[in-house]
Amino acid sequence: MKILIFGLPGSGKTTLARPFAELINGVHLNADAVRDKYDDWDFTLEGRIRQAQRMRYLADGVVMADKIAIADFVCPTPKTRILFPADYVIWMDTIKQSKFEDTNKMFVKPKKYNLHVVTKNAKFWSTKIKESIN
């Protein structure tokens, strides 16, 4: 299973993904760590498309190893979300804007998701997600 936790920078994606991954014994894939490993800090649309493809590739490897992949990244456009076909999608909608104006302009609110997170409470939402996917 591939789980996507996405939203604006600062919305709490990583803060939720870490404890949730521990709770379900999943593998957490953090976009910043992946960008660091690939030394690719390009935040243009092309860079974000490349990142979505990279995150999909890594998550697919986790799934092939019979684990649950929890990917947390901005995934700002419908195209980047299509490129990361998640089995379960969590939208972190806890802030109106990030500190990055270019990302704010690029971010398109999703029409489809499994869970809409509206508060920063990782313990509560981790339990809620676990219940929802079981």
Image (tube, rainbow, N blue to C red):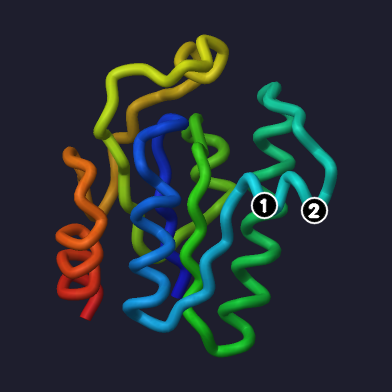
Three-letter code, disc 1: Ala
Instruction: Please report the residue visible at 36 percent of the width from the left and 42 percent of the height from the top.
Output: 12
Which residue is more in the foreground, 16 or 61? 16
In the picture, residue 18 is in which quadrant? bottom left
> If the image is split into quadrants, where does the C terminus sit?
bottom left
Horizontally, residue 41 falls left or right of residue 91, namely right
In the picture, residue 46 is in which quadrant? top right
* Percent x, y of residue 100: 52, 16
Instruction: Please report the residue visible at 28 percent of the width from the left and 19 percent of the height from the top.
Output: 96
* Vertical comparison of 107 with 24: above or below: above
* Percent x, y of residue 101: 51, 10
Which secondary structure lies at badge 1? Answer: helix
Q: Are marks 2 and 1 in contact (CB under 8 Å)?
A: yes
Which secondary structure lies at badge 2? Answer: helix
Horizontally, residue 92 falls left or right of residue 10, namely left
Q: Residue under circle 2?
A: 37
Q: Residue under circle 1?
A: 33
Instruction: Please report the residue visible at 20 percent of the width from the left and 58 percent of the height from the top.
Output: 125
